[in-house]
Amino acid sequence: MTTTIREPKTPSPEKYAEQVGQRPYAQQVRKGDFDLTWCRAEPGEGVWGQWGIKAEPSRRGMTLMDIEEASGLSPGPQGPASVAPRGAGSEPGLGPREWDLNEKHELWADNLVALYEEATSRQWRATEDIDWQLIESLPPDLERAACQFNTFLTMGEYLVNDVLAPWLPAFNTYYHEIKLFLATQLMDEARHTEVFRKRIFANGGGLGMTLNLGNALAAIGATEMGKGARTSCSRPGTTSRTPSMSSSRGRSCRCSVSASTSARPTSTSRSSGW
Ligand SMILES: [Fe+2]
């Protein structure tokens, strides 16, 4: 019997460093040939965005509202085809970047910054903010029920993050508010997973049965909301579009889906076993 040793798909850190070092730009930098465009350009010439802004912290500290008020960089109705943060200039020659969601009416809520500030100011740690020592011993059937329920809840948290996470790269960076807030929500869902898993092992029980969530969701009618979410598109190379959060617009491809509660169809959702 022979054993075939395959090259790992991911190079080792040493190999990767070697590969990176061979790139023309890396070699240029290592010779001391730095691009100092950012340093030499004067504010206002297109490389820089704004300059000379000094925001003042408010009662709660330096909030997103405070810097927006000082900079006057309120979001307009449409983001540019660029990776530029709102208000930034661009490196000369920087190429365009298309985003799935570019228009304010597709992704905006007036309380996004407030929700983000609230999310970051009310963090807690399941590790120490729950007194795990206080859990009382339960009869075996109740402990089994608790563990089965928490196993189910854990699956639900995975599902939520699998649905939410693919939206993150869909939003234009021009609208950082939605990106920041969504990141806090993902963190929150991760913490829920943490709490439920810790509860499972905190009282003498263990992981329960993996449920068919599709059946469970169908039983309560939840899957009705996602019907039609996965659409096919005749355009070569296109598998799906981001779910429309409002109305469909004049896109080159009109295969957007109308179910706002569905996952953005990506490889994640296509292969999902939920
Ligand atoms: Fe959750």
Image (tube, helix red, strand yellow):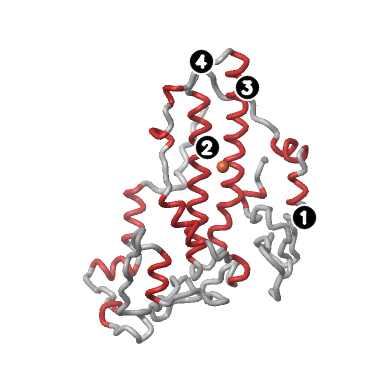
Numbered disc 3: secondary structure: helix
Residue at 73% over, 69% down: 254
Q: Which residue is mark 2?
A: 193
Q: Is residue 103 left or right of residue 18?
A: right
Foreground disc of the pair 3, 4? 4
Instruction: Report the front residue among 32 and 167.
Output: 167
Q: Earlier in the sequence, mark 4 or mark 2?
A: 4
Foreground disc of the pair 3, 1? 3
Residue at 69% over, 57% down: 260
Above-or-below relation of 92 to 207: below
Quarter of the view holding residue 231: bottom right
Q: Which residue is mark 1?
A: 228
**Alpha carbons under labels 3 and 2: distance apart:** 18 Å
Q: Which residue is mark 4?
A: 137
| Mark linked to residue 188 | none
Foreground disc of the pair 3, 2? 3
Q: Earlier in the sequence, mark 3 or mark 2?
A: 3
Q: Which residue is mark 3?
A: 145
**Alpha carbons under labels 2 and 1: distance apart:** 29 Å
Foreground disc of the pair 4, 1? 4
Report the amino acid beneath label 3: Ala
Determine whether the beta carbon of the residue marked 2 sits less than 8 angstroms from the nearest atom of ligand 1.
yes
Looking at the figure, which quarter contains the C terminus? Answer: top right
